[in-house]
Image (tube, grey):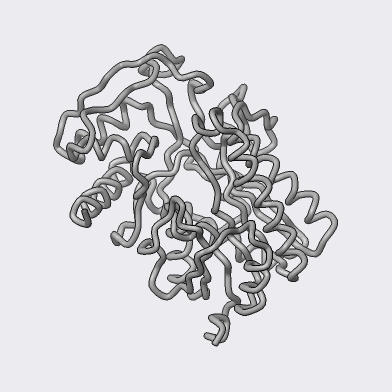
Amino acid sequence: MSIADTGGKPAVLVTGGAGYIGSHAALALLDAGWPVVVLDNLVTGFRWAVPDGAAFVEGDVGDAALVAALIAEHDIRAIMHFAGSVVVPESVENPLKYYDNNTARSRTLIETAIASGVPHFLFSSTAATYGIPETIPVTEDMPTVPINPYGRSKLMTEYMLADAAAAHPINYCALRYFNVAGADPGGRSGQSTAGATHLIKVAVEAALGKRDGVSVFGTDYNTRDGTGVRDYIHVTDLAAAHVHALEKLIAAPEESHILNCGYGRGFSVLEVLDSVDRVAGVTLDRAMEPRRAGDPDALIADNSAILEALPWEPRHADLDGIVADALAWERKLSERG
């Protein structure tokens, strides 16, 4: 029996649904009553991260025959596309990997979706498409001048979606994430990749003794304390935005959207580390290091467009709460071994 035979809402294919953000989106869909099929090649994802209740297929989004078969078998009516590579320094060292995983395979997936009659497509994009913005906060109509292959590989997919939607009966929403952090408050999923580079993940690992300390890259930025400022969004709020965006695409099939996903306020590196100290009851060792090339002083979303377009209300915007959920998940990973 197809998963779509459960009745009610149409089935959604979640690519990369065994990964960090994809698994949370699958949880949000299931919680809201959507049938979910997860496709993941498990290169960076984890089979145990796929939520109970979702059908799972191990495979690659670039396998057009497999994807077409899944769409037909489960009567897929929407795709949420999270599969891809996300480490900025690696994209500089190995750009063709990123143009393969993030651009070429996305092209194949979009083509398969159109050929199979899937009318709705949600894309996991990034604030890296803006590069180093001239002003803060960042609005969606600002120039997109990415400074690394990761950002360019994502922007190319946005271009493909816009051109495809103009030529074919498909609409899309590209969600440009700012700094995603935290974990499912119920402890069902979280960031699990070894060697992660995200600040809050690194800091909670250090708080639990998994790292010796935390490097602070740059203390001379034009910010309130000299360290870089970023807009941190809780992964559960981000997942909720995807569900609302899907509902919007279905309700208005002639419209497509590009939306920033952030809270519209930022915290510095030192403020984040202070939060981890408070929540974990520790004092992290902080190593002051030189700036990394290409890091802007601040990167903060103007989120007025998403608040206007969707009935999305952030529920987990407290920094200490984001850190507490990340820390609880990190402890759970320690227990898992």
What is the number of callouts on the image?
Answer: 0
Near-viewer residue (179 or 152): 152
Q: Is residue 291 above or below residue 301?
A: above
Q: Is residue 314 visible in this depiction of the protein?
A: no
Q: Quadrant of the N terminus?
A: bottom right
Q: Is residue 275 left or right of residue 145?
A: left
Q: Residue furthest left?
A: 281
**Residue, x 63% and y 68% (percent of image)?**
66
Question: Relative to residue 238, is residue 200 depicted above or below?
Answer: above
Residue 170, horizontal then vertical, whole percent? 75, 62
Point out residue 277 in the picture as x, y percentages from the top left corner: 20, 33
Q: Nearer the viewer, residue 219 or 159?
A: 159
The residue depicted at 57 percent of the width and 50 percent of the height is 124
- Is residue 15 visible to the viewer in this orientation of the structure? yes
Query: Is 30 positioned to the left or the right of 168 in the image?
Result: left
For this orientation, the residue located farthest to the right is 167
- Relative to 325, is 264 on the left or the right? right
What residue is drawn where x is 70% and y is 30%?
Answer: 143
The front one of 232 and 18 is: 18
Q: Position of residue 259 (x, y in %)?
A: 62, 46
Task: Name the residue at 50% across, 42% down.
Answer: 262
Q: Image height check: is 53 above or below 157? A: below
In the image, residue 134 lies at what x, y percent?
Answer: 62, 22
